Image (cartoon, coloured by chain):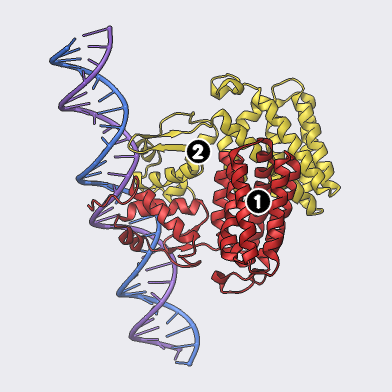
Chain colours: A yellow, B red, C purple, D blue
DNA sequence: GTTACGGTTCTTGTATGCAAGAAGCTGTCA
DNA sequence: TGACAGCTTCTTGCATACAAGAACCGTAAC
């Protein structure tokens, strides 16, 4: 009916990308209802592609569809967050080990560059900038592992966590950025030394450390209360 | 239109469950086309719930939808299989470690029982029976870790691998069942001793050992050719 | 005040019709 | 014989109409 081609391929893909972005970024708050008809109107498509997109997002754990009732943005419980961090620890540890085993690849230079920029950001006390660099560091690591399946599961996991929101909150704790940065340095060092298991465990330690910092921080989108009190 | 209630809830759930089972079990062979209209007719529903089910199965990596062309059962490439095993190693290692950390839980007795039965099956040379017990052992381990997120990712991974098919093939190699069983014993032993990291690494070693056996075995559903030659 | 009941109005679930694009076939021409 | 253009016939993609169930609100009885 409408001939607006918009972006890439079909209507469903467009809707899914838009919704996922909106949910992960926090634009759509947890528990918020998502009406098929509203979304359809917003994207100027019919309900059919919207429904298909919603079903896929449900598979990814981002939303919850209660039959004949409604669709809602899902917010992980405290227990789920702990579980997701446990998984994150394994996946990122795996990434570090695999990357160490790949020898010298260009991505290592990007990681060096990241550490360099992070160092400056921390010195300046620019937590917003550092927060993004942290995100990039972890992304580079997982990408550099060169394992597509790992990447897929990792992305799904991170979407559920709405990770960048959490980490931003954790970095406001005094001293946390310095600790975080030195842990990043240590991981990269071991990767450069091709010490696979050393890198894996340094990374796993780092994730646990980051988890502790995150869980004791306040998340502004969860009502500003510490996560440790949520459940 | 038809009032056959069949199983549980809605048409989509029924179709999805049926299709997933058919694909994972090998009833639908790789590369085989799946026509929406045929499936709709088979389940006596319209194309709409079928389409939604297919989209979800695509998210899980079981099928591939080529727009305006058709839907096909996906078969992982050799590279993907290697990647999936690398993930499996981490996830099952994690499960063993978590289970060791839980202390004495009833599931440990089920694992003992499993080892007991496995022992008899191996002695009798009943590889079919042992194959199922292997499957159960790994399932029990992951379930016993008591981490829902882990379970979800694990199940998704195993569905993609069509794991039980692969493992059946690997167990036909002479001596393999004995090695496999003794590795299972070792893992459970370390779990009983509450040695988390010991259990994790014993399990990871076991998965790698199992991977090597699998990759050199013939898979009857992949044309009977060794996987190592596929790509 | 509280509770039970009925109807209204939402929501999502499913069926169906039509459009768009891809693959393959067929006939023609060089 | 080989190649190419056009058509036929498939497929999925999307839009729309209708059905079914859930939540909610108002009313009446206790």
Residue A132 location, x and y as percent?
68, 34
In the rendered image, is residue A162 in sight? Answer: yes
Asked whether residue A3 appears in the rendered view, the answer is no
**Structural crowding at the residue carrying mark 2, measured as other residues with C-alpha within 10 Å and reported as few (<14), some (14–19) or many (≥20):** many
Q: Chain of mark 2?
A: A
Which quadrant: the C terminus of chain A?
top right
Give the residue pinned by disc 1: B87
Pick the front one: B196 or A55: B196
Label 2 close to label 1 by CB (< 8 Å): no
Q: Determine whether A166 is above or below A107 in the image.
A: above
**Is A82 in front, or is A58?**
A82
How many numbered tags mark residues here?
2
Q: Give the residue at x 86% y 47%.
A: A193
State the residue position of label 2.
A62
Q: Nearer the viewer, residue B109 or B97?
A: B109
Q: Secondary structure at mark 1?
A: helix
Q: Residue at x 58, y 74 (%)?
A: B224
Q: Residue at x 45, y 57 (%)?
A: B21
**Who is closer to the viewer here, B138 or B166?**
B138
Residue A53 is situated, as x and y percent measured from the top left of the image, at 43, 45
Residue A172 position, x and y percent, is 69, 22
| Dot 1 crowding, Cα within 10 Å, few <14, some 14–19, many 20+ | many
Name the residue: 50% across, 38% down. Answer: A62
- Image spot of residue A47 (x, y percent): 34, 44
Q: Is residue A3 left or right of residue B170?
A: left
Q: Secondary structure at mark 2?
A: loop
Q: Chain of mark 1?
A: B
In the figure, residue A167 lies in which quadrant? top right
Mark nearest the camera among 2 and 1 is 1
């Amino acid at each position: 009916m409408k001939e607006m081609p918009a972006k890439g391929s079909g209507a469903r893909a467009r809707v899914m990308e838009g919704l996922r972005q909106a949910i992960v970024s926090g634009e759509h708050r947890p528990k918020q209802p998502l009406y098929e008809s509203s979304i359809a109107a917003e994207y100027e498509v019919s309900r059919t592609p919207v429904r298909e997109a919603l079903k896929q997002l449900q598979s990814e754990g981002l939303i919850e569809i209660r039959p004949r009732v409604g669709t809602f943005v899902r917010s992980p419980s405290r227990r789920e967050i702990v579980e997701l961090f446990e998984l994150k620890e394994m996946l990122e540890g795996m990434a570090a080990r695999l990357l160490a085993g790949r020898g010298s690849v260009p991505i290592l230079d990007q990681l060096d560059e990241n550490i360099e920029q992070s160092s400056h950001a921390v010195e300046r006390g620019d937590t917003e900038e550092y927060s993004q660099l942290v995100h990039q560091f972890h992304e580079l690591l997982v990408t550099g592992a060169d394992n597509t399946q790992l990447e897929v599961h990792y992305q799904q996991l991170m979407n559920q966590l709405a990770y960048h929101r959490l980490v931003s909150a954790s970095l406001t704790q005094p001293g946390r950025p310095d600790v975080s940065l030195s842990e990043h340095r240590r991981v990269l060092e071991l990767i450069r030394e091709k010490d696979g298991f050393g890198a894996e465990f340094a990374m796993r330690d780092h994730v646990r450390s980051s988890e502790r910092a995150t869980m004791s921080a306040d998340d502004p989108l969860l009502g500003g209360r510490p996560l440790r009190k949520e459940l």
